[in-house]
Amino acid sequence: MQRKYLVITGGVLSGLGKGIAIASIGNLLSSTYKVVPIKCDGYLNVDPGTMNPIEHGEVFVLDDGGEVDMDFGHYERFLGINCKFEWNLTMGKVFEKIREKERRGDYLGKTVQMIPHVSDLIKNHFIEVGEKTNADVILIEIGGTVGDMENELYIDAARSLMREVGKENVLFIHLTYLPIPYGVNEQKTKPTQQSIGLLRQRGIEPQIIIVRSSEMLSEKTKEKISAIGNFKPDEIITGLDVDDVYKIPLLFEEQGMSQLLSKKLNIKVIPNLEKWKSLILNKENAKREITIALAGKYTALEDSYASIIEALNHCAAHLSVKINVKWIETDEKNLSLKGVHGVIVPGGFGSRGTEGKIEVIKQCREMGIPFLGICYGMQMAIIEFARNVCGLSANTTEVDANCLHPVVDILDEQKLIINKGGTMRRGAYPAIMKVGSVIHSLYGEFEISERHRHRYEVNPKYHSILLERGMVFSGMSPDGKLVEFIELPSHPYFVGTQAHPELKSSLLKPAPLFKGLVEAAVKFGEGESIAYF
Ligand code: GLN
């Protein structure tokens, strides 16, 4: 089929959920077509890897090791695909490429300009990704809000894409916001009108408008928007506030989205939402309730652990459990696990809060509270075990470079990589499971693959003592050198991994270790006869 491009822009405010909106549209398309997303970010960092998660949210890591925006998490979870680093454009990457080309003499003595050179490079990237992936539909999300200086070049590239691939093959969707001011109690369309106007000034006529709102749009509101934009009422969709983002594909479908897409793109969209719907209902009708503590450093900003929360959501739907998340800031004094049925110590960097994490893990180990340690969380579990079970004065060299027993350390081969400028073990790595371990039974496979993002490893010099004292290495790298998964067999659920399994969790296929944790937490709750209603 002729490749189609869907471009989503945002108006009025940032943070309205463009990523979720386009991922939801992609979800409807993906049961019939091969859908590939491209995200365009305006910032000058090459990727978000160096940004503070408090400011930017979680750094999402792909199979190929690329560090990308959190929106890729939504794309992967809603489209059921593994994304690639080159599907994320940032202005940092764009200018890097322009400079490379200019130095190489590709511009043959011409003055290199924002338009056409930079915008052409972006447009060509859109087309190349389409060709390389052989996608039927390319989703292009332009970050920020129309009118921002940062995204002008992306918008221009999308405009010129129409000329290149034909107007009929590019569909512009614009997401705006509808305020209902207190006291006036009226749905106000002016911001939507104005942002459509801004888009028109840039040569773009949106064909579908999604209006984010706390209420369904009234007929009168739709008429107003129709009048200024020559839209038909069915081309105006309410992006209703919902308590669960997984409801958005259903919400769009109820308003006739797949019919609209079929008409606009001249294709046949047949969504498949049955399983999706039943999982959402399963979660809504949960009969059991548990509390999982998330003990970390960036607990102030939920976004920095977005994929972990998502992974718990997926388990909630599969196991029909309501999961309350309790945030525990580990550099605070009071680290009580009262009323908690399971604990996650997530990934992290640096020394702040590490002693608190170790203390929390000790309580879990001693009191039989289900525990899942992710990356730094697993490294902390190794330290805790080395200290309190093996009796070593242990630490990671990340916190104490001169500690007596560096049970977690940068390995020599890893140091070589760091010197070469690649600073971390990043992306998908395979692991071989220990047959009969809890983790093996949860995965149900002998060889698995999960994503990584870290520098340090369990120090091989200490493998034997940890094993002697009862720790099980449930998964190792194929060469048998790196500890990828651990567990304590004497404990109801004490599990850790050097990887980030939350990154591959999805509503249809929750991450096995999270499922194991939630199941164990439910049992723990039953044992305490807590929280059943
Ligand atoms: N700081 C640890 C390391 O670099 C863990 C990183 C992480 O949790 N992602 O190895």
Image (tube, helix red, strand yellow):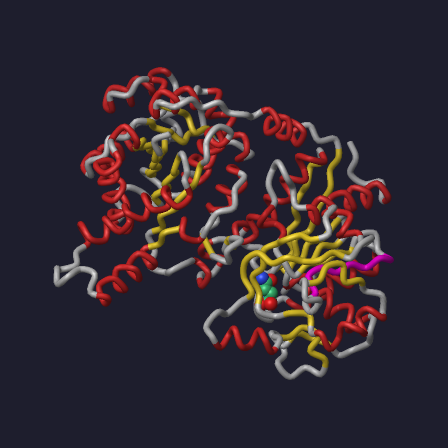
Residue 2: image location, x then y, percent: 34, 31
Up-down: is 463 above or below 92? below
**Outermost residue toward the top?**
219
Can residue 259 be seen by looking at this rendering?
Answer: yes
User: Image quadrant of residue 175?
Assistant: top left
Residue 340: image location, x then y, percent: 75, 49
For the stretch drawn in magenta, what is the main secondary structure?
Answer: strand
Q: In what quadrant does ligand 1 lie?
A: bottom right
- Kindly identify the residue that appears in the image at 36 percent across and 15 percent down: 219
User: Image quadrant of residue 455?
Assistant: bottom right
Answer left or right for 199 relative to 361. Answer: left
- Kindly identify the residue that appears in the image at 73 percent across and 67 percent down: 382
- Kindly identify the residue that appears in the image at 59 percent across and 43 percent down: 310
Q: Which residues are magenta?
A: 483-490
Answer left or right for 319 relative to 277. Answer: right
Quadrant position of the C terminus in the picture? top right
Residue 67: image location, x then y, percent: 47, 57
Q: Report the front residue among 99 and 231.
A: 99
**Outermost residue toward the left?**
110
Up-down: is 189 above or below 305? above
- Kindly identify the residue that appears in the image at 19 percent across and 36 percent down: 203
Q: Report the front residue among 475 and 506.
A: 475
Q: Is residue 235 magenta?
A: no
Up-down: is 418 above or below 502? below
Residue 142: image location, x then y, percent: 34, 43
Up-down: is 147 above or below 206? below
Quadrant position of the N terminus in the picture? top left
| Count of picture labels | 0
Answer left or right for 406 relative to 415. Answer: right
Can residue 348 be seen by looking at this rendering?
Answer: no
